[in-house]
Amino acid sequence: MPKVALHWQIILGLLLGVLVGLAVNITWDAGTWRSMGVDDPGRWLAGVDAADVPEGIDLDQIPASDRAEKFPNAQAGPAAKGARFLRDLNDFVGSLFLRGLRFIAVPIVLFSLIVGASSLNDLSKLSRIGGKTIAIYIFTTAVAITVGLLLANVIQPGRFVSEETRDGLVSTYAIEAEGKIQAAQAPDVWETVLNIIPTNPFEALAAGNMLQVVFAALLVGVCLTLIKKEKAAPVINFFDAMTDVVIKIVNLVLLLAPYAVFALIASKIADLGLDVLKALAVYSLVVVGGLAVMIFAVYPIGFRVLGGVGYKRFYKAISPAQLLAFSSASSSATLPVTMECCEERLGVKEEVSSFVLPIGATINMDGTALYQGVATVFIAQLYGIDLSIGDQLTIVLTATLASIGTAGVPGVGMIMLVIVLQSVGLPLEGIAVILGVDRILDMCRTVCNVTGDAMVCTLVASSENAIETEEQVEARLRAMRAGGLDEHPLEEDELDQAAG
C-alpha cells in the first residue's frame, strides 16, 4: 500500500477535526451532560469534581436545582468520566504537538542565524542582505495593513453584527479579553530599540525573547567572521550540526501532526459552535479574503515578477511549510520546515535562507498586521465610531512598529491588537467580540506570515544570484532519489513528486 504523504495526512486530520467538532457542538448540550449526572459541565471538564456527599443524604430526594448548587456533578457516572477522559486526551495530543514545536523555536533561530551570518564572510555583503531583508519585511507589513484597512472600509463587516450579539460576545469572553489587555504594552520607539539588546543573553534564550535572540545570534555570527578561520571553523561547524539536529527533531514532532491538527481543530470547533461562527462570518471572511490577496496577488509580485520564480514552482515548494504554519499557528515553530522548503525545494542557498528566514519569523507579521487593520475597523464599526484618515495612518504605523517586536507564537496577534486599539482610542472590550474565532484566524494569518517569509527569502536570493534554476533543483532532487539519500525525511514524498 503506497504511503500517504504527510501533507495529505494533515489535510485529512483537518477535515475530520472540523466534522467531528461540528457534530459534537450540534448534538452535545447541557441535557446530554445531565443525562450523565453532570450539572456543571465547566467544573467537570476543568477537573473539579463534586464535594463529598455526607452519609445519610439521598441525592434522589433533593430537588435538581438544589442538588446542582450544593453537590454539583455528584452523580457523574462512568460515561461522564469517559467523556472527560476523551476531552483531556484530545487536549493533551494538541498541547504535546505545540510544545514540541515551541521547544525548537528558540534553538533554530539561534543556531541558523549564527551560521547564516558567519557564512557570508563579508561584512559589506551582510549589511547589504540585511538592509534588503528588513526593508522588504517592513514594506510588506505596511502593505498588508493597508489591504486590511481597505477591505474593512469597503465591506464594513461591523454592520453585520447586531448590538445584542456584540454585548453577548463581550460577556462570554470578558475574562479572556481582560488577560490580553493586561498583557499588552504600548510600544515606545526608544524602548523598542533598546530592548533589542539583551542585558543577559541567556535570560533572553530562557524567556524566548526572539528579538534579543536574533541580536545575540547576529552578533556572534558577525564576530566569527572577524576572528581567525581556524578558530571560527569548529564553532561554525558546531552550530551548523545543531541546526541539522533541530531539523531532525522537527521531523519526529511532525509524525504527530495529523493527529494534533485533528485534536486542535475538533476541540476549537466543538467549543466555538455555529452561533459564534455565523455572527462573525463576514468579519472572518474579510480577514481570510485579505490574507488571500496578500498570498496570491501581492507576494507573486515579489517572487514571480522581481524574483523570476514561477507561480507553481513557488507554491508547490513551500506547501509543507504552509500546512505546518496552519497547524501550529507559529512562524517560529514552522521555521525549520520553511528553511528546508526554501533550500531543498526552491534552491535558495543556505547562506541567504539561514539569515533571511529567522529574521522573518521574528519581525515579519504580514498576516497578523492585516488582521490588525480589519479588526480595528470592525470594532470601530461595532461601536459606531468613525475613524479619520489620520487615525488609519496611526493604525498603519502602530501595527508596523508593534509587529517588529512581537514574537512569532500563537495568540500574540491579540496582544498587538490591544496596542493598536489604544493608539486610536477605541474601546478595548471590543476584542472580546472577536476572541471566539481568533484561534482559527491565527492559523490562517500564520500561513500568510510564513508565505511572506519565503517570498522575501526568494527575492533576496534572486537579487544576490543565490538561487538555483528550476532545472537545477529537479536535477538535484533526482540525484538524491537515485542515490537513495535521506537527508531530509520530512520531504521524502515531496522529493518523489518534484523529481517525477
Image (tube, helix red, strand yellow):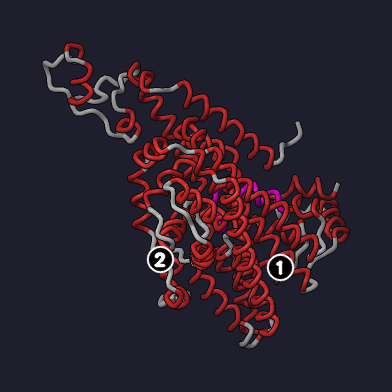
Element on which disc 1 rests: helix
**Which amino acid type corresponds to the residue marked 1 in the rendered image?**
Glu
Q: Which contiguous range is marked in magenta? A: 318-333
Q: Quadrant of residue 68?
A: top left
In terms of depth relative to the viewer, which is nearer, 372 or 102?
372
**Label 2 crowding class (10 Å Cα cut-off): few <14, some 14-19, many 20+?**
some
Mark 2 and mark 1 in contact (Cβ < 8 Å)? no
Vertical relation: 245 (above or below) 120: above
> x, y (%) of residue 210?
50, 66
Amino acid under disc 2: Ala
Q: Is residue 486 left or right of residue 104?
A: right
Circle 2 sits in a helix, a strand or a loop, which is it?
Answer: loop
Q: Which residue is at 53% across, 58% downward?
A: 104
Foreground residue among 218 and 104: 218
| Residue shown at 37% from the left, 58% from the top | 183
Q: Is residue 326 visible?
A: no
Numbered tag placed on residue 186 in the rendering: 2
- Going from N to C along the chain, the mark reached first, 1 or 2, is 2
Q: Which mark is residue 350?
A: 1
